Amino acid sequence: MTINGRRVSIDADPSESLAYVLRERLRLTGTKISCDVQVCGACTVLVDGLPVSSCTYLAYEARGREVLTVEGLAHTDGALDPLQRAFIEDNAFQCGYCTGGMLLAAHAYLADEQDGDSGENVFEALAGNICRCTGYVPIVAAVLRVRDG
Amino acid sequence: MPSYPYPFKILQPASVAEAAQLIVADPDATLYAGGTELLLAMKQGGLRFETLVDLKTVPGLTGLGVQSNRLLIGALVTHRAIARSPLVRARLPELADLESRIANPRVRATGTLGGNLAFAEPHSDPATLLMALDAEVASAGPSGDRVLPIGDLIAEPYETILERGEILREIAIPLLAATQRIAYHKVQLHERPMLGIAFRLDLNDAGSRVDAARLVVGAASPVPRRSPSAEALLIGSVDDLEDRLLSAAALLANEAELVDDEEGSADYKRHLIEVHVARLGRRLLGSEDGPEAGAPDAGALVRSWRESQRHEPKPGFRVVGHSVPRTDGPSKVTGQAVYTADVRVPGMTYAKVLRSPVAHARIRSIDAAPARSAPGVVGILLGEHLRALASPRYGHAVRDHWILAVEKVRYVGEPVAVAIAETEPQAQHALELIDIQYEELEPVMTAETALADGAPLIHEEQYETGASPGHVNLEAIAERSNLLSHDLLKWGDVDSAFARADIVVEGEYYYPMAFAYPLEPYVAVADYQDDMLTVYSCGQHTYMVRRDLVDVFGLPLSRVRVITPFVGGGFGSKSYTKIEPLTAVCSWHVRRPVRLELTVEETVLTTRSDDARIQLRTAADATGRLIARQARCLLNSGAYAENSLLVSAKTAARLVGPYALEAVDLESRAAYTNTAPASSYRGFGGFHATLASEVQLDELAERLGIDPLEIRLRNLAPPGTVFYPGKRPMTADAAGDVSLVAEALDWGTPRPRGRGLGMAINAIDAGAAPVGRSEVRVHGDGSLTVLSGSAELGQGSRTVLAQIAAEEFGVDLARVRVVQSDTAVTPFARSTGADRTTTMEGTTVLLACRDAKAQLQEMAQDIWEAPPELVTLEPTGVRLADTDERMGWGDVIGRYFRQRDMEIIGRGHIRPVGDWGLLPPFWELPLAGVEVDADGETGDWRLRRLVTLGDVGLAINPAMAEGQDLGSAIMGLGVALREELIYEGQQLLNGSLLGYRVPGFGDLPDTVAGILVEGQDGIGPYGAKGHGDGSLSSMSAAVANALHAALGVRLHQPPFTPERVWRALREREAAAAATGATAGSSGGVR
């Protein structure tokens, strides 16, 4: 599979979740495990641009596909993505445990918006991601800051 | 666990026929489509398969098209693809709409319609709508192909009539004619729908008559149910259709086999069916709009937030008072920030915990021999191993918490054995090989039964007090009862005050058990070697964890090192010691580093919040002036003391409120029970007490005909007055604060029907103990390292402490590094909680900076050989008076020591003497105001507006300060809305995120406003006062008061679920009817 633009070859057991492969085999620990039941969204990564719960989603499913994790959001020269900058500017995180997944959910939403009508508003697009610290409004503010330029 | 508990293989058939063969040939195989239901059930242990047959490799199952006026959807088309298909949106928008609301975007991206139907999870949407559309499914199997009406497919919950090897291929949905109309409505409380209703009307060409109808209910019944009799009733003229809707709804409800479950009672579901069938019917007839015409306006919400964030920095400050970006921002948005869960140590092993399945029992035997020889197992830790420790128990207040159950278990979920293995799945596997025999004892599940005469004893032993005994009442424990603590707060003559009162209001209020849900579950890594222990902890109180570990192992303080990396949320639930002793003892047992990470389910079983039943009476005079209060509080504190003694004491103390009462008699008791241990939760005692205190105040106001705002203004203690004998006078302008919130809510202006305003306030003795120290190293280049024992939980202490140091030394924030919470490196910090860090640790950093600057000043005198009065401090260095000679901080160090990169260290501390000796260091005023919008038929409600206020003295970082208040308020909203841990018998019913739903984006109000009040009147740096826990404490009371304003019902027990609001409405109607009837009949007698 391709992870954050780099092709990697992994000999994983079919029963390994994508999060396990990312965190334990590749040491990409920006992907967090929290609820472990596909509810909280902390483990959200994008596979071919679509958000999945990597806690449950099998690494098997990502074979031959492109996986984007929070570690791959910044540009190759190290510059932060506008969404990452907006998260900092708007204090869209506190403890940071949901942030990787939240950024990727927002990234998918913004990509959909660019492609045209996704049929989802920003609340619906992010509804599957839980944050316990911020009260969400700063996250919406950051996402709209990028969406509306 | 990040991977699956046992290995399985995946087969990739090339055709439906091959898939069928594979399934038929292997009894341990199952079909695998999107996997969102199947994998979850496998991970949770509900289902076990050795082989998954992956249908995604079978071609021809992902088609989506229209043929013969039927929409054909391949079984493997995802919910997302259906929701976004232009074809579906154009031809069957109701289905696209339903699919766009299934679960969450991730489930929609992966889960398939066929998988959903084949799994037959009852709390689901699609089948209900599809039945109303007369959809059919096509399948292929060993007995050939067939086509089934969707209603025949689902046999019972999680069961279809498909035979083994029969594969669902396609869903065929007849498209609607212009005269056919359909609508679907779902009601959802937790993660899955509690009720779905699909309603279809087929009209004649003229639109005057219903020729046919479909009425289907799902999620509330075991399987989706059509009601032919209700449908028959609907046939006929549309003119009087509205009159027939209610009867049809009743028939539908009768035939649905509605179930009572944690989502709601059958009663309420029946009522919802009646309401929503009528609404859907009117919608289909065009006489009523759909719900929420138009999406919520995210732009307006964000504008309101930005508006309230406009902030004029205080003059004279360069860094402090400015909303500088968080210094941990870059690491947190790139995934580089390291939390305990990310720590790996060479040679590390993994632990998994075997937990008690029974609430109260003696352990008769444990057979762990087979587990010891299981693959990868390094060791099995049992209670018997604890004998070699200095203490087998820990606890900062009462040392009653067994690291592992010994002889007895006291709640379902208590750790009984631990498997330590090379991998986590190996440890998990080993647990299955441990056999434990229990002799069950009578369990004690509620505080009331725990304190009843003859109740079984939960703890028979005599325990010692811990290192921070606080409110321990050893007498109570010595009495051999289940009474954990008993506090009585009294002043004045309560009897005479109540006798004198013009009015007395009383009531019982109940705040439920809750789960703080920090996203990072409990996790620890421990390494015990050469009688030295290193522990990575996610705890808030790094140094208290160290104390407990020192006591467990009998080691000196210097030999126990506790490191707290970034914490993934605490909210009080990570106060004190949790799994660190267990992890450390595992490492001590196997002499290898050990990592233990709990699941969220295990985290709930480790710490929840105390519930509290509060009977409160308030006495006032006719003008609404409060005179006295009397209360009896009872808390269910679970199997171990933890911090519940303090929770109980604070529940009583915080019933005083910010009011000057002549007399109080406030009693609180906490009871041991056979439930999960309760402990701190953000602002404990505050939220328990504020519910009772502030709802009752509104009730008093109503009885007296005084506006709720006015009654507060009449009673709030003015700044500087002693309102709580023996404590610091009021440190804020509470009346001014309340007025600001009222103004922001347009208090007093009339509201539309169903809307109401509410507010609540309290005064909380925050800050905990005023003691601590910090160090600041000034380096040879003038840059700074701040050393603080406090932890970064997300609250922003790392940024705020850096701002203080940068301000003091006139340097850029980029030249300051804050090192925190490592007992081998950083100075002692008592704890990170009670909103104390900015005020107390901030003060010690400020003092350390000033100490360092004084040293630099002396060093400059030496360098310049000048008398003290001629060397003055400037913002960025020192100056020789009357000259242009200046030195920066680094120059002073370099010239003094004649050594590049030398450094000095400044120290600062506070201790509880002088001004710091008067408690509390500051009063924190939890204050929130809300506007709710309530549905008088269903009881459903949502927030329209939220106003928080932080009376912070001075905001070191205003944006972060407001973020604390907002986050706290939304967390508090969760309990007002739906959060509540429920015990059924011995078991916690909803200890997972599937049944315990915290607030999400969908719960946000239309607008938010955060107000900061900065009187520079605090005891902390530059006049700062702590805050952040606050607004949570006020939310339940504010919402209850607003619901009364909106609907006229009083609710005393959050969560204020729609069902509870509806019940209150119904009771009020019944009471009104009864009064009306009585009045009528007595009138007759006259």
Image: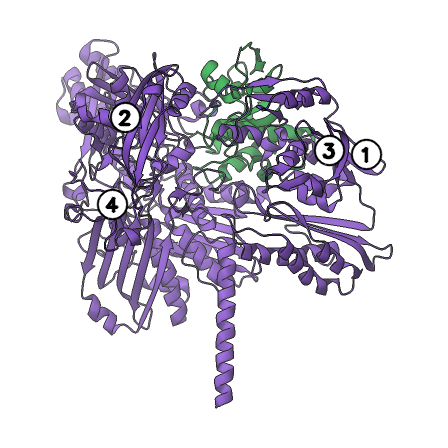
Chain colours: A green, B purple
Q: Position of residue B129 (x, y in %)?
A: 69, 44
Do the residues under discs 4 and 3 have CB atoms within 8 angstroms?
no
Do the residues indicated by labels 4 and 3 lie within the same chain of the protein?
yes
Which is nearer the N-term, disc 3 or disc 2? 3
- Give me the residue at 51% from left, 63% from top: B1065
In this orientation, does residue B872 appear?
no
Residue topped by disc 4: B646
Q: CA distance from mark 4 to mark 3?
A: 57 Å
Pinpoint the chain carrying mark 3.
Answer: B
Which is nearer the N-term, disc 4 or disc 1? 1
Do the residues indicated by labels 4 and 1 lie within the same chain of the protein?
yes
Name the foreground residue: B341 vs B902: B341
Q: Disc 1 residue type?
A: Val
Name the foreground residue: B564 vs B1051: B1051
In the image, A146: left or right of B911? right
Pinpoint the chain carrying mark 1.
Answer: B
Q: Which of the two marks, 3 or 2, is nearer to us in this view?
A: 2
Residue topped by disc 1: B66
